[in-house]
Image (spheres, coloured by chain):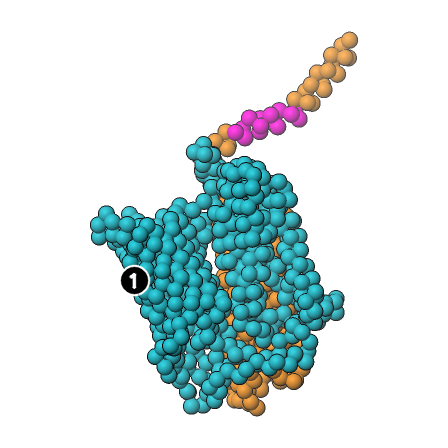
Amino acid sequence: MERKVRGFVTVAAFLAAVLMPAAGLAQEAPATRDTQPAAPASRLWLVAGGASTTMRGACQTCEEDTPYRHSGSVLGTLGYRVDQRMDVGAEVFWVPAETASGRIRTTHVDAVAQFRPWASQGFFLKGGAGMAFVRNWVDAVGPDALNSKALSVVIGGGWHFRPASRLGLELFASQHAAAIGDIKTADADVPDVMGNFWSIGAAIVIR
Amino acid sequence: MPIRILALTAAVLLSQSPGASAQNATPSPDPDPSTLCAACPKRSVGRAIFQTTMVNVFYEMANLVRGQVTARITPKTWWNNMENGWVWDLDDFVVNQVGHPYQGSNYFNSGRANGLSFYESAAVAAFGSSTWEYFGETNKPSLNDFINTTLGGIALGEMFHRAGWLVRNTHATGKGRLWSEIGAMALDPVTGYNRFRTGDASRVTDKPPDLVPASLDSLVSAGVLWRGSQSSAFTAKGQPFLEVDALYGDTNTGRSRTPYDAFSVRLRFGGGSGFSEARVRGRLLGQPFKNGSVHVSVLQSYDFQNNDAYSTGAQSFDAALGGMHTFSSNTSLHVLGWAGLTVLGAVDSLPLGVDERPDEPETPPSGGQGVSEGPRFYDYGPGSDFGGVARLVRKGRTIAGFMYEGRQLYSLDGVRANHLLQRMRVDALVPLRGPLGIGTSAEFFHRRSYYQDEAHTIKTYHYPQLRAYLAWSGK
C-alpha cells in the first residue's frame, strides 16, 4: 500500500514538474499578449540575389544570326507589400557580359508587381516595365561605349520558400526584353534591335 | 441592403485593423468574396487560370478553323518562340490596338469571374497574354501585343465587367432576367458563362456593392462630321457618326482605393471608319484635399483612334489633378488636368519620301494566311502624355466642354522619329426637350514628326473637324 502511495506521489511529482512550467507559460501568455501587442507586419519588400543569364541581341530585319551570350547577373528589388499576395516595387537588374569583341553592360530599371495566387504557397508570377540602359563596347566607333536607352519589359515566376516569414529565399526564372530601336556601330546603323535576357537565379527576400 | 453594406464595411474595416495586420504575417486561408456578397462569384485561382487557358484554346481553334497558318502550333513552334524571345510584329493597326486588348479583356475577366480582385485579375491578364504569345501562335512572340493585350485588356476588361453588372438585373425573374443576363454576357462573356454554369444567372440577389456606381451619366450623339487636312479646309462630303460617352461614378471626387470605381468611356462608330474611337480612362486611386475642392488621382488610360486621316493608340498611366467650381445651385464647372507616361503608343506614319500610303496588295502573303509580312505603316514607342478637360454643367447636364490632350512618342519600331500629337476639341450643347439636345463641336488634330535623318526633317500635319449632332443625355 505504502509502495503504491509512494509510486503515485512520484508520478504526480514528475507530472507536476513537467507540466507546471507549461501551465505557468500558458497563464503568462495572455499577460504577455496584453502588455506587449504584436507589432504590425512590415510593409517592406526587399529582394537581393543573382542569376545566370543567357542573352541575345537581335536585329529583326537583319539576315545575320546573332549569338547567345552567357553571363552572371545581379537583381535587387525595393518595394511595398500591398497585401498577402501582391508586392509592388522598383527592380534593378544588371547584366555585365564580356565577349571576345568587347563588353556589354545592361541595366534594367523596372516598376514591377509580383503576385502569389495562393497566399499560403510560395508560387509567384512577376511582371513589369521600365527602361533599360545599354552600354556597349562591341563594334564601337572609338574607345567609348555606345550608350542606348531602351523600353524594358520583364515577366517571370518562381517559388518563394518560407513565404510566411520575414526572411525567405526564392528561386526564380525571368525574361527581360530591351527594345532598343536603332544602334550605331563602327560599320553601320543597325535598325530594330531587341535584346532578350533569360535568367534563372536565387534571391534573399525580406518582407 | 443597409445591413449588408454595414456588414461589408465592418468586414473591410476588420480586415484592415492592426490585429488583422499582425495576422498578415502568417498565411491565412484565402478570403472568399462569395462570403461577403450573395452575388459575388466563389474565389478560385485555379479555375481563373484554367479558363484563361481555355480562352487561348478558343482563339487558337478559331484561327485554325479560319485556315490561319499561324495557328498550326506544335511543341517545336513553342520551343522556337521561347528560344527567339520578343520581337515587334507587323500586324494590322486595328488588330493590334483593338483586337488584342479585347482578347486581353477576356483573360482579365477570367479572373474577375472567379472572384479575383482587380490587381489579381491584372496578373491573370498578363499570364494569358504571355502564354498566347509563346504558345498560341507560330508567330514569334510580339512585345507590342504583350503590352497591348495586358494593359488594354485590364482597362477594357474592368470596363466591360462593370458595364455587365449595370446591364444585369439581379432582382428580376423570367424572360426579363434572362435577357439582362444574356446582354451582360455579350459584354463580359466569361462572367456570363460562369453565372449560367453555376445557376447564379437565375438567383435573385443584390448586386455586389462595389460594382454599383455612385452615379451614372451618359450622352449619346448622332450626326455628321466634316474633316479637313492641311491641303483642303474641309471635305464637302460629311461622314455620319454615332458617339457614346459614359461617366461611371465621378472620377473627380471622393477617396478611392477601389480601381475603376469611377471611369469614363467614349466609343465612336462611323466618322471616317466603322469603329473610329475608343477611350477608357479609369481611376486607380483617388484622394480629396482641401475639403474636397481639390482631387488628386492616378488614372489608367486606353486610347484608340482610327479614321481616314490618322490613326493613334496608347496605353498610359497618369497623375491627375481635378476640381469643381460652383457658380450657382444649378451651374458648376468641372476641371481635370493630367500628365503621365505612355507605356506604349502607336501612330500612323510614312517613311520620308513617301507621301501616300500604297494600296494593300491583293495577293495573299507568301508565308500563308494570317502571316503579316509588312510593310507596316505605323510606329511604336513609349513616351509621355498630358492634357486637360473642362465641363460646364447646368442642371446636371453638360452644356459646354473643352478638351486638350498632347502625347509625345519616341519611335522604337517603325520610322525613326519623335512624334508630338496634339488634339483640341470644343463642344457646345443646347438642351431641347427632356433629355434631347442639339450640339456642335470643333476639333483640331495636330501632329509634328521630328525625323532622325541627317537633315533633321520636321513634318507637320493637321486635320480640323466640325460636327453637328443630335444628343440624348441619360442619367
Residue at figure coordinates x 76%, y 10% from the top left = A2
Indicate left or right for B1 with A4 as reference: left
Image chain in cyan? B
Q: Which chain is orange?
A: A
Task: Name above or below for residue B346 compared with residue B33.
Answer: below
Q: Residue visible at 54% across and 82% down?
A: B359
Magenta range is: A17-30
Residue A171 location in percent, x, y? 64, 58
Residue type for callout 1: Ala
* Residue in view at x 46 percent, y 52 percent: B259
Left or right of residue A62, residue A146 in this image? left
| Image quarter of the N terminus of chain B | top left
Foreground residue among A89 and A38: A89
Residue A206 can be seen, yes or no: no
**Front-most of residues B60 and A173:** B60
In terms of depth relative to the viewer, which is nearer, A39 or A116?
A: A116
Q: Which residue is disc 1 drawn over? A: B428
Q: Position of residue A37 (x, y in %)?
A: 47, 36
Name the residue at 43% across, 62% down. B242
Label 1 residue SS: strand
Q: Which is the main secondary structure of the residues drawn in magenta?
A: helix
Residue A90 position within the rendered picture, expressed as x and y whole percent measured from the top left: 50, 61
Residue B232 image-quadrant placement: bottom left
Instruction: Single out the residue that lies furthest toward the top.
Output: A1
Magenta residue check for A27? yes
Q: Is residue A62 visible?
A: yes
Magenta residue check for A68: no
Q: Chain of mark 1?
A: B
